[in-house]
Amino acid sequence: MYKALVLCALAVSCLAANLKLVDKGRSNYAIVIAPDASPSERHGAEELQKFLEEMSGARLPITAERQPRMVLVGDSPALKELRLKIPYTDLGPEGFVLKTAGQHVVIAGGRLRGSMYGVYTFLEKLGCRWLTPEVSRIPKARTLVLGPLDEMQKPAFEYREPFFSEALDRDWAARNKTNGSFQRLDASVGGKVQYFPFVHSFDQLVPPSRYFKDHPEYFSLIDGQRRERGGQLCLTNPDVLRIGIETVERWIDAHPEATIISVSQNDRYGWCECDRCRRVEEEEGGAHSGPLLRFVNALAAEIEKKHPDKLIDTLAYQYTEDPPAKVRPRPNVRVRLCPIAACEAHPYGQCPYDAYFVKNLRAWSKITDRLYVWHYNTNFAHYLLPFPDFDELIADIPMYKQHGVVGLFMEGGVTQGGGAENAELRSYVMAKLLWDVKADANKLIDEFLDGYYGKAAKPMRAYFDLMQRQVRMAPDGMGKHIWIYDRPSAPYLSDEFLANARELFRQAGAAAESDAVRTRVRKARLGIEYVALTRAKKFTVEGGWYRPADLDGLKDRWNTFLSGLRQLGITNISESTTAARDDQDFGKYVRPYRVVTLENSRLRLHVVPELGGRITHIIDLRSGKNVLQEPEPGAKQYPDLGGLAVTPYEDYVTRMPGSTTWELDAGESPNEASLTGTCENGLRIKRRLRLDGAVLHTETILENTTHAALPVALQSRWDVDPGGLETVVVRYRKQDGGTVERALIEPERIPAGSESYNGGDQPDGEWRVVNRRGGLVMVNRFPKEQVGRCSLTWTAKSENRVGLTVWSVSRVLQPGEQVKLAADYGTE
């Protein structure tokens, strides 16, 4: 620390010695503000006074009167007397100038936040750094000498939000010049870019609970039905527009502080399939964003009449990510483009899996010059998981600027206790790049690690570099990819990486010079501990049981891990649940399950009745390969997912309420078994399994044992692992006579997807998963008259999984009636 402070003092002293701000702990300067200074200008003056005193011991008075030697903060009568030409119009609300004028220092800019930001930049030039809300680096120098200053700065983006718990603090956010909606920035620091609501607002805009009963036509038509749940709005309905305008007017009245109103799709699929919405999509080149943007534009035009200062926000997200062909966003509309499917390991322009997004970014930037981006910066399923996205981050924030993006929401982990991987470092680097895309990111990383870890900085930097090499493209690294819902078993988290990381953390812990630094190292180490713990949860079949290898040891490790989280104040290790809920799920799911094994000369089958009657293994005895894709131990509800399972739904969209309890029927044989499932709503399922050579025959009968008619559709889903999907195809003959060979991984496309097939597009009773490199061919056959829909899903994101799903014909089942679904699963 002493060396760093000496360097900072030398850096100050080496400036041209024509303005001595502080001399041996004393100063003849005053900080001058206007009598009517804005709140942020006054706050900036107070911060300047505070930190100059902390640095040098000199306390400069704050006054509104002209002084012989002044540090002028903001516009004021005293500044006007100097007759300097300050370009306030060009500076806008957040820009500023730093100038020396004779014996005076001028820090002046936009009244909203500009002059305050100028103060913080001035202090940074003196060596001050605010790394986290708790850790700052303020150099000590009894004498401060300044050379000439003459520069102007404006932010690279109008909206700058690092979304981590560690970045919400008011003072940290103001000092690092961010202005995000969730940051605790009040009027004293010039406020912020305030959203209301923030996102996914359709259910608030036109609440289904209020309108669906009498006006189902306001909501999405999906698969022939208007949907109260699981959908969106019918955006071509004029009454929906009218109600939306009225709702936004009420929001503005109730939240006058809001600068942006979000009119955005719910966080799910389910767009409207009515004739009018489809017609608009066709006019817009097939883009689902067409009806959305036309609706938002119409609403924004009406809002502008009364509220010309308000902006209307919407999303280009998931199904609306592709831009429309004709409609263009109005000037008061902000579109937030969301690269949710992107690989976050590599600069987007260099990764083939991100080419789809770069194409969309370029297309959107051609139709609006006010584009926002919602960027993703953590693993939302596993906040603690090592997430080496810094190469991507450092390259793509400037890339966004080059493409005309004007606002960035950088979504990380925000929970009560914080703790997302590298959140402090990531927030700091983001903040600096969001202000100045030309900032030296590697220098920022070094200065953060030095200030945050002290003597442990060297091994912590080595760990940081080790992480980046796991994903950096060859020849500089391993070239692995990472995704925002990646797995603890992902390829970039190799055993060699974990071993090297443990050694570096050992070195960092030994080098740490204080309990505070040791705690920071321990917190950073949680990621690799979490990987090892999660992998130890993997279930295997042994001795008639499905369980982890060392269940008692695993429980002890889990409890120790949770205790460590509590000591650090970390409440969440994923976006969707708390650590307390994860602990409940651990107790519920992580236990031994009795296994039923069927076997013949070709196949071995493991069935776990307690896990939804799920088949966890279909082992081809010739190759020893489990045909089924084995689920990730870190997944929620593991091990109750994946494999081959049958599930009752109300229709092709809506899952049955409640769960199904399965039991093994008596009288099993070596190659046959029967199970009975009882649903909470009274439906009963009989399922028969039989091995015949290399084929598993299944027959499922769903019976309505209640006294009421119930809508039903049976789903049988088969998740398989055919090897690398780059060479995998799905082959079938369609019911209309055509043939299909569906390649799953296509150049410059997302390496995951889903499709559904109806009517003549359905497989004609058989489809196959084939790896053209060789290996097993996986075949699913079914009576086509029993099947009303087929679905295909796939992903190559750190795993190779193909899901073949067949559905029974959707129907209303009267009391006493049955529906049957047969399906065969085999290998060739």
Image (tube, rainbow, N blue to C red):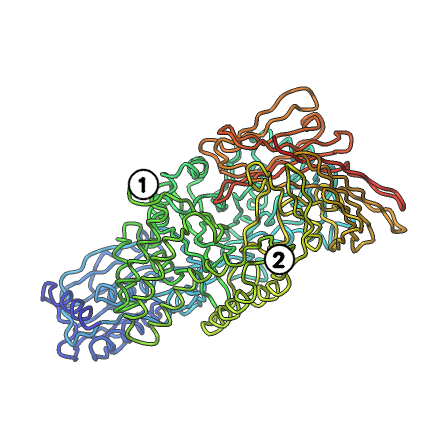
- Residue furthest left as drawn: 17
Q: Is residue 463 above or below residue 807?
A: below
Which element type, helix, strand or loop, lies under badge 1?
loop
- Residue furthest top as drawn: 737
Q: Residues within 10 Å of mark 2 (few under 14, many from 20)?
A: few
Residue highlighted by disc 1: 474
Q: Is residue 509 above or below residue 299?
A: below
**Viewed as shown, does residue 661 lie left or right of 177?**
right
Foreground label between 2 and 1: 1
Residue 78 point in image, percent of width and height: 24, 68
Looking at the rendering, in which quadrant would you find the N terminus? bottom left
Return the residue nearer the eye: 618 or 768: 618
Return the residue nearer the eye: 373 or 527: 527
**Viewed as shown, does residue 580 lie left or right of 370?**
right
Q: What is the distance, in whole Å, between disc 2 and disc 1 at their CAs?
A: 55 Å
Question: Going from the N terminus, do you reach mark 2 or mark 1 first?
Answer: 2
Return the residue nearer the eye: 291 or 18: 291
Residue highlighted by disc 2: 250
* Residue located at (40% from left, 51% from top): 494
Q: In the rendered image, which quarter is residue 284 located in?
A: top right
Give amino acid for label 1: Ala
